[in-house]
Image: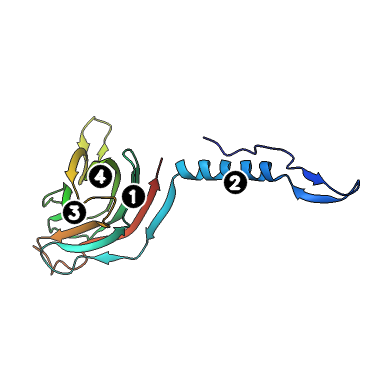
Amino acid sequence: MSLVRQHNPLGNVIIRQLGDAGGPRSDWTADEINNLITWAAVAPRNIHRNLAATGTVTTGLDNLHSFSLPANSLQADGDYLRVRYGGTFATNDSDKRIQINFDGQVVNNSTLFDIDSGSWLYDIIYARVSSTSVRASVVFMWGNINRDGGGTVGGNGAFSGSLVTVTVANLNNNAVTLLVQGESNASVGTGTDDVVQNLSIIELTQQ
């Protein structure tokens, strides 16, 4: 729905004598406030942003960005989160991996992949199916994929999507953690900062 005025102009009540204004009519004021509440309830709103650069430390899975979603944020079936994650890969020949987790459940695991440079992005929707289940729609893009004039597809990159439903703690009563992890096999160097996350934006839409 769009946000529009219910009463325009929001008139004043005339009291005592002509020209005395007693403020807006109380019923009209209530209408305007109720309209704002209704609009805000179904409008997406930002609940988290993180632009700090956090990278892998050595080999093995390392935690990158994390966010604790307060209990009852996804309070009704159909409420959902829209999430954008992003970051960069070090320029080297180490294989790299990104894992996306919701309340300790893996919603996407790239496995180790030969990516030698560039950036990465994830667009995710987490939708409440029930108080203990969430459906995750995940689309990700790694590096660069291109097509030359001869029709050959090239570039050191990946593009994929997935849809999974995971069982989680009761969303009405428990905070749940959204976590991104990265890994490098460190065939070159130590693995430090081979995968870096520097963007997390999370928006919540409730009914």
Marked residue nearer the N-terminal end (3 or 1):
1
- Horizontal side of residue 188 vs 77, given as left or right: left
Marked residue nearer the N-terminal end (3 or 2):
2
Three-letter residue code for mark 4: Ser
Q: Up-down: is 150 above or below 134? A: above
Three-letter residue code for mark 3: Ile
The Cα–Cα distance between marks 2 and 1, rounded to whole angstroms, is 32 Å
The structure residue drawn at horizontal position 12% and vertical position 55%, both measured from the top left corner, is: 95
Residue 143, image x and y in percent?
25, 48
If the image is split into quadrants, where does the C terminus sit? top left
The Cα–Cα distance between marks 4 and 3, rounded to whole angstroms, is 27 Å
Question: Which label belongs to residue 33?
Answer: 2
The Cα–Cα distance between marks 3 and 1, rounded to whole angstroms, is 14 Å
Q: Residues within 10 Å of mark 2 (few under 14, many from 20)?
A: few
Residue lying farthest to the right in this orientation: 18
The Cα–Cα distance between marks 1 and 4, rounded to whole angstroms, is 23 Å
List the residue tagged with mark 1: 84
List the residue tagged with mark 3: 98
Residue 80, by quadrant, is top left
- Horizontal side of residue 178 vs 33, given as left or right: left
Three-letter residue code for mark 2: Ile
Q: Nearer the viewer, mark 2 or mark 1?
A: 2
The Cα–Cα distance between marks 3 and 2, rounded to whole angstroms, is 45 Å
Asked whether residue 143 appears in the rendered view, the answer is: no
Which residue is more in the foreground, 156 or 70?
A: 70
For numbered disc 3, what is the local secondary structure? strand
The structure residue drawn at horizontal position 29% and vertical position 50%, both measured from the top left corner, is: 172
Marked residue nearer the N-terminal end (2 or 1):
2
Question: Which label belongs to residue 131?
Answer: 4
User: CB under 8 Å between callouts 4 and 2?
Assistant: no
For numbered disc 1, what is the local secondary structure? strand
